[in-house]
Image: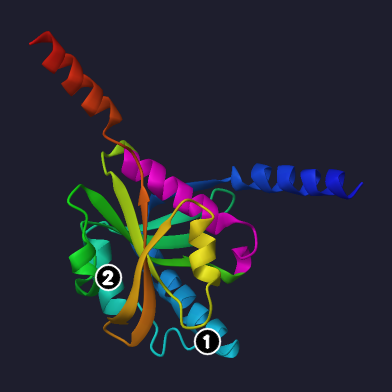
Amino acid sequence: MEVQIKLMKNAFREMTRAQYYLANMKDHDLDKAYGIICWQADYLRSKGINQYPVPYPTTVELHRRQEKDYNFCLYDSSNDQIAVFASVIPSGIPDGWKDFEPTESYVWISSLFTSKEYKGNGLGYKMMSEIESKSKREGFRFALLDTHVEYGNFLVEYYSAIGYEEVVRRSIVYPTNTFQGALMKKRLCTMMIDHGLSEIITNVE
């Protein structure tokens, strides 16, 4: 009986996920997005996690990213509200991780936030999947991100569960604070086809 209930819950969750779609953040949603950032910072502080002493991205940074089309949202198609948002920055690894920058094309996934009303529905995973699929279609070979480790490994485990590998840990200086972080990396596609073609051409010659 417990197994059946679990399967029913999973089926319902997959069904509800289908009502969400990925799109560039709309300009009129910038204030809403910043409100989500502030709520997340307050929520973490209430749990004793001072991850964001000052909400980040700041409004200035959020607008800068918007101008460059870096902000993406998972929208609820039933009401066009933001469920999850993140910034996806091509070749955008921060300076603190530059010595681990891939030589192949990559995207830097920054600032993944879920709205209060949508937390607990697995939509963070869906957002990551949508971002990765989009980046892969555009020819990017890797996705990278960083996460805090000062308060335990739960975020590392979260990203590991969807295929990210931990590269290194170190103290990272950000515009609003310094924290102990883990750099995470995931290969989106391989050179297998390219290598195969190369071998064929070599054999023909």
Q: Is residue 101 left or right of residue 43?
A: left
Residue 137 lies in the magenta stretch: no
Q: Is residue 55 left or right of residue 155?
A: left
Residue at x-position 59% and y-position 42%: 18
Q: Position of residue 91 (x, y in %)?
A: 20, 57
Please give the label number shown on residue 63: 2
Furthest residue in direction front, as rendered: 203
Numbered range of the magenta stretch: 117-136
Residue at x-position 41% and y-position 65%: 29
Residue linked to disc 1: 49
204 or 70, nearer to the observer: 204
Q: Is residue 83 visible?
A: no
Q: Is residue 47 left or right of residue 196?
A: right
19 or 153, nearer to the observer: 153
How many marks overall?
Answer: 2
Residue 48 vs 161, above or below: the answer is below
Kind of residue at disc 1: Ile
Q: Position of residue 205 (x, y in %)?
A: 7, 11
Residue at x-position 53% and y-position 64%: 157
Q: Position of residue 163 (x, y in %)?
A: 47, 51
Kind of residue at disc 2: His
Q: Quadrant of residue 203?
A: top left
Residue 62 vs 129, above or below: the answer is below
Residue 121 lies in the magenta stretch: yes
Residue at x-position 40% and y-position 41%: 133
Furthest residue in direction right, as rendered: 1
Distance from the alpha carbon under mark 2 to that under mark 1: 26 Å
User: Label 1 crowding class (10 Å Cα cut-off): few <14, some 14-19, many 20+?
Assistant: some
Q: Quadrant of residue 181?
A: bottom left
Magenta stretch, main secondary structure, is helix
N-term mark: 2 or 1 = 1
